[in-house]
Amino acid sequence: MKLDIYNIDGKASGKKIELPKDIFGIEPNDHAIYLSVKAFLANQRQGTHKSKERGEIRGGGKKPWKQKGRGGARAGTIRSPLWSGGGRIFGPRPRDYRQDLPKKVKRLARKSAFSYKLKDEQILVIEDFIFKQPKTKEFVDMLKALNIAGKRVLLLTNGKIETVYKSGRNIPKVKVLEADQASAYDILNNQVLIMQKSAVDLITKSFGNNTAVEN
């Protein structure tokens, strides 16, 4: 499928780019996307949660009252999980939530995500650009020119462009990533996917394919 290439001033450049069908035009695999997103979110967890169990609570070593004769329930420690201030039963412990996926599943999930975005007409291709210095205003002006200001946007660049990254990092709902680093979750978790022209080639190369064709 061919898409128009826009300038950062929001006008069509008159050029078109043909996106590879085997990346942007496959039949999406929902289960691969599910597995990829689940693994991505799990890998973001720190796993440092911890609560104290009965044996870790300070104090309570002495039996609070005798076993029988008081008319009340027997108790062995004031740090029982049944008491206020006591330990927690089966509380959370530090653990690693990381999940690994086969490379083929990750690749299929990314291809499926790209195919969904193209199918839903949520992809914009723009000419390569770079800011002389980090300037949030210039980034905002570009979004306004493209009529996507206020939307959740992901910009994919050809490698890490420091000035572009710093210009967009403080804008709400905007994320800037290197094209070959975007996961299926990143690709789908936006309303508009913007790709620099050379970023399309980087995406294509990351799948081991030939570069996209520009007309």
Image (cartoon, grey):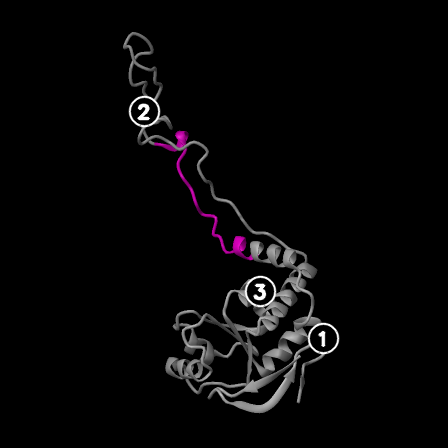
Counting from the top left corner in percent of width and height, residue 84 is at 31, 30
Task: Residue 38: say if magenta.
Answer: no
Residue 125 lies in quadrant = bottom right
Residue 49 shown left or right of residue 21 in the figure: left
- Identify the amino acid type marked 1: Asn
Task: Say whether residue 207 is visible.
Answer: no
Residue 69 lies in quadrant = top left
- Name the residue at 67% across, 63% down: 108
Q: Which residue is situated farthest in the bottom direction here?
A: 14
Whole-number angstrom distance, CA of label 3 to CA of label 2: 50 Å
| Residue 133: image tag | none
- Identify the amino acid type marked 3: Ser
Would you call the spot at circle 3 few (<14 residues within 10 Å), some (14-19), or many (20 or more)? Answer: many
- Which is more N-terminal, label 2 or label 3? 2
- Which is more N-terminal, label 2 or label 1? 2
| Residue 183: image tag | 3
- Which is more N-terminal, label 3 or label 1? 3
